[in-house]
Image (spheres, rainbow, N blue to C red):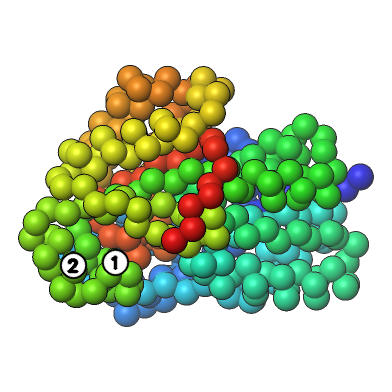
Amino acid sequence: MRPIKILSDSCCDLGKDLRDKYDIDYARMNTVYHDKETVADLDFKEYTPKELYDTMRNGERIKTTQVPATEFERIFLKYAEEGYDIVYIACSSKQSGSVGTAEVVAKKIMEKTNAAIFCIDSLNASMGEGAVAIRAAEYRNQGLSVEEVYSKTMADRKKVNEFVTVHSLDALKQAGRVTGSSAFFGNLLGVKPIIIADKNGAQTPIKKVKGRRKSIEELVNLLADTMIDPENQRVYIAHADAQEEAEQIKRLVEEKIHPKEIYIGYIGPIIGASIGPEALAVFSFGKEVTFEG
């Protein structure tokens, strides 16, 4: 049986510590930052998180690209030629076209190598996508075949629960997710939406909360309601340059949920560009997502 390589992409928001621990690599997307196309590196090698988010705070829009076909060709061929079968965990197809490009490239690579390449729409983004990739890596580490890893991961992707809130509606307005007037009055009134990834992987607002503190508390309450067997689960907390509030969420999670582990990390350049500075998100496996926006 060939060894298995787990891949994701720049939307997975996994820090180097987790990528190294679970032997996960990722296909690079790009940002257009200060009028220059730059690799969307999850370790922020091109710019610091503060530099990226300060650019957005100053009113400049960061544009993004999906994974280029040439990048899929590079990374698939690299591991295929090293003798690996590949499972690629992609950002939700409702948010990126990368999984479609990957499937086309994978077919070409399989025709000229012995590798099996499986491409999975994670139905998630940010650390929700990353959580799916880690679960796939755990299956691989258990000695499962590439077909078994694919099958189990396809089922598990439906059980990632994501809850997100934003500090300002401006980035969502620029991304076309709310109208200009809604953003203006929402900001004026301190309205904070709670957003989930629905059963189809679409980012969907499910409620509005007045005030930042209330929105943070609601993230934890909603996550607690969806978790199963929390003492054996990891909770992922992602933030867009809001470390202090991420630590606040961690304390609330410890008090209310008591999970096995809590991981805090940055929302990376791609997701951050569409959701904006000070966004906060929590993720964990739990009840199957059934809500459809």
The three-letter code of the residue at mark 2 reads Ala
Q: Quadrant of the N terminus?
A: top right
Image quadrant in which you'd find residue 268: bottom left
Residue in the picture at 41% in, 36% down = 223
Instruction: Check contact, mark 2 vs mark 1: CB within 8 A.
Output: yes
**Between 155 and 283, the one nearer to me in the picture:** 155
SS under mark 2: helix
Toward the left, the furthest residue is 188
Q: Residues within 10 Å of mark 1 (few under 14, many from 20)?
A: some
Residue in the picture at 48% in, 43% down = 161
SS under mark 1: helix
49 displayed left or right of 81? left
Q: Residues within 10 Å of mark 2 (few under 14, many from 20)?
A: many
The three-letter code of the residue at mark 1 reads Leu
Q: Count of labels shown?
A: 2
Query: Which residue is denoted by mark 2 in the rendering?
Result: 183
Q: Position of residue 124 (x, y in %)?
A: 52, 54
